[in-house]
Amino acid sequence: MSLRRRRPAGAQRTGTPADLLVVGLGNPGERYAGTRHNAGATAVLELAHRHGGHLRRRPRLPALADEVRIEGRRVALAFPQTYMNVSGEAVGKLVRRFGVEDLQRLVVIHDELDLPTGRVQVRVGGGLAGHKGLRSIRDHLRATSFVRIRIGIGRPPSAAAGAGYVLSRPTSADRDALTAAAGRAADAAEVIATAGVEQAMNTFNVR
């Protein structure tokens, strides 16, 4: 899908566009570091670490961001510094800043209640399952056709416990599973960058 007709506000790209923009969702600040809701942010930080990136504030961007090379591909990495529920404000500006006009070049890594803890799945578009960060991105881009890397965090014990569950730090067993899942999510982003999203789905969506 092209974004030529509607460009989100923000700094405009003046150099070579990124081949891929990978955004890890979460809430900013030490209070939320390591929580289930920050699984996507953990994955993008791992990806930056692997490739010598340093996520830092950029002028006019409400996000920590950097660009790295993955097998010759120019990959922009970002962790929005807006809160999760308004992630679209940052993603809209990131899309413009890094020259992303085709949403197949936008990858969003996020936590997913509908997957067992630690499972990783790659998807293009699809339902948002009530995820407020994804809803905000949809509202700003007016589309859901971006690529998603879903990190399963499992279901809370009850619907009423949902908000507290996603904002809590996991048990030691779940923490180990989520750390491993963040690594696999970073692996999936690398495959998308180098071999394409279909290859990533074939690799990571098997049970």
Image: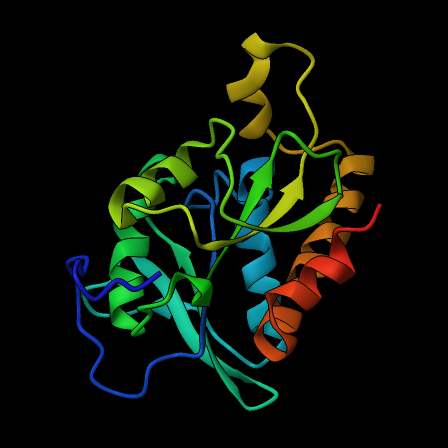
Q: Position of residue 82 (x, y in %)?
A: 31, 46
* 83 to the left or right of 37: left
* Furthest-bottom residue in this view: 72
| Quarter of the rendering occupied by the C terminus | top right
186 vs 141: above or below: below
| Quarter of the rendering occupied by the N terminus | bottom left
Q: Residue at x 55, y 71 (%)?
A: 48
Q: Residue at x 55, y 62 (%)?
A: 45
Nearer the observer, 37 or 108: 108
102 vs 34: above or below: below
Nearer the observer, 196 or 42: 196
| Number of residue marks | 0
Q: Position of residue 19 (x, y in %)?
A: 44, 79
Q: Residue at x 65, y 77 (%)?
A: 195
Q: Residue at x 77, y 62 (%)?
A: 203
How is this picture coloured? Answer: rainbow
Visible residue check, residue 35: no
Q: Position of residue 85 (x, y in %)?
A: 36, 35
* Furthest-front residue in this view: 1
Q: Position of residue 28 (x, y in %)?
A: 41, 46
Visible residue check, residue 98: yes
Q: Quadrant of residue 98?
A: bottom left
* 52 to the left or right of 152: left
